[in-house]
Image (tube, rainbow, N blue to C red):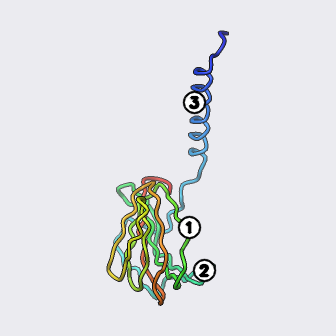
Amino acid sequence: MAAMNRRDLCLSAGAFAALGLLAEAQTQPAPADTTDMTKSRVFHFNEMTVQKHDNGGWGRPVMHGTLPTGEFVEVHETMLPPGQMPHPPHKHRNTEFVLMREGNVEYWGEDGKHIPMGPGDIAYSASNQLHGMKNTGTANASYFIVSISRGQM
């Protein structure tokens, strides 16, 4: 066997790392579809289960499942108390839309800008782009999240 130089060693290490990530991705279970996405329907607000959050807010899962066209979709409503964030700024593979229902928040985009949002405003978070939010108002803020991804989220 020929001796490996630094370049060959780095290339080999990168290849093994990629194989490891590929193997890990293949062993991750696909998200469980809990909504039949083959039929149109109405989701009644008063039938959605409220889940309490540690920040004093709550969430209402609406649905999640795979569309007949192959995209995985998850929809939920969140209520965020004044001064609170749902979580620190983050990024993920899925694309997200934030649809403001009531209250005022500040949306933090990839470019570091803090953009005010109020009722009726919509924010778009592209895949793998840093984003976050904080309730900057004096009242509770509520919004819906529509999250879309190919395959796993």
In the rendered image, the vertical position of residue 36 relative to residue 138, given as above or below: above
- Residue for point 44% across, 71% down: 75
Residue tagged 3: 15
- Spot occupied by residue 81 in the image (x, y as percentages of width and height): 53, 85
Q: Earlier in the sequence, mark 2 or mark 3?
A: 3
* Mark in front: 2 vs 1: 1
Q: For residue 111, which quarter of the picture?
A: bottom left
Q: Residue furthest top?
A: 2
- Residue for point 60% across, 84% down: 56
Image quarter hosting the N terminus: top right
Q: Residue furthest left?
A: 120
Bin the neighbour count of mark 2 within 10 Å (Cα to Cα): few under 14, some 14-19, many 20 and up: few
Most foreground residue, 7 or 13: 7
Most foreground residue, 148 or 90: 90
Bin the neighbour count of mark 3 within 10 Å (Cα to Cα): few under 14, some 14-19, many 20 and up: few
Residue tagged 1: 88
Q: For residue 124, which quarter of the picture?
A: bottom left
